[in-house]
Image (cartoon, helix red, strand yellow):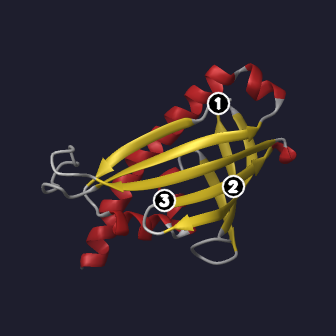
Amino acid sequence: MRPVTVSIDVPQTPEQVYDFLDVMAHHERFTNHYMTGWRYEGPARGVGARATVTAALAGAKADVDIEVVEAEAPRRIVERNISAGGRRRAHGTYTVEPLGTGAGAGAGAGAGAGSRVAFTYAWESAPLADRMLAPFVRATMRRANGTAMCRLATELARHASATDS
């Protein structure tokens, strides 16, 4: 199945975005519209940080094991996702790039300020039903992850104002 990528521009620097995304528990704050019951293991941040969640999409629920397998501050975090009894394997990759002058940083960002945050979900293997319904599965993932990106922007703003206080 072809990967799904969603992105958003935010006024925070790549370092601020990465610092927030590097903490596994922060992901619950912007994905809990479809991923619930977060249970954490391992370190709080970086390679080896793990969570097990229950994902509910399109009327189906599945436990998903998430583990950070690569981290390159302040640009990239790669998570391995395993669900469906190991039949669904994927990688979720966050990339954070600085916005250049005039690149359209989010509202309130100064010239040259801000970051583009992208999340790519790429399947390595998927159950037959997922493959047969690939257009629907991809559209569902694009919607859920697009919502997550909008919620991430809100959480980044909250986090920035809390750390500035």
Give the answer, above or below, for where 4 lies relative to 47: above
Is 56 or 119 nearer to us in this picture?
A: 119
86 horizontally vs 119: left or right = right
- Amino acid carrying mark 2 in the image: Arg
- Which comes before the other along the chain, label 2 or label 1? 1
Where residue 16 sits, quadrant-wise, is bottom left
Q: Report x, y in % for residue 19.
A: 43, 71
- Amino acid carrying mark 1 in the image: Ala
13 horizontally vs 39: left or right = left
Give the answer, above or below, for where 149 lies relative to 113: above
Query: What label sits on residue 80 in the rendered view?
Result: 2
Q: Residues within 10 Å of mark 3 (few under 14, many from 20)?
A: some
* Residue located 46% across and 69% down the image: 73
Q: Report x, y in % for residue 161.
A: 26, 70
Per the image, label 1 sits on a secondary structure element best described as loop
Q: CA distance from mark 2 to mark 1?
A: 22 Å
Is 161 or 81 nearer to us in this picture?
A: 81
- Amino acid carrying mark 3 in the image: Arg
Q: Residues within 10 Å of mark 2 (few under 14, many from 20)?
A: many
- Which comes before the other along the chain, label 3 or label 2? 3
Q: CA distance from mark 3 to mark 2?
A: 19 Å
Give the answer, above or below, for where 91 lies relative to 4: below
Where residue 66 sits, quadrant-wise, is bottom right
Q: Residues within 10 Å of mark 1 (few under 14, many from 20)?
A: few
State which mark lies toward you, 2 or 1: 2
Residue matched to label 1: 58
Residue matched to label 3: 29
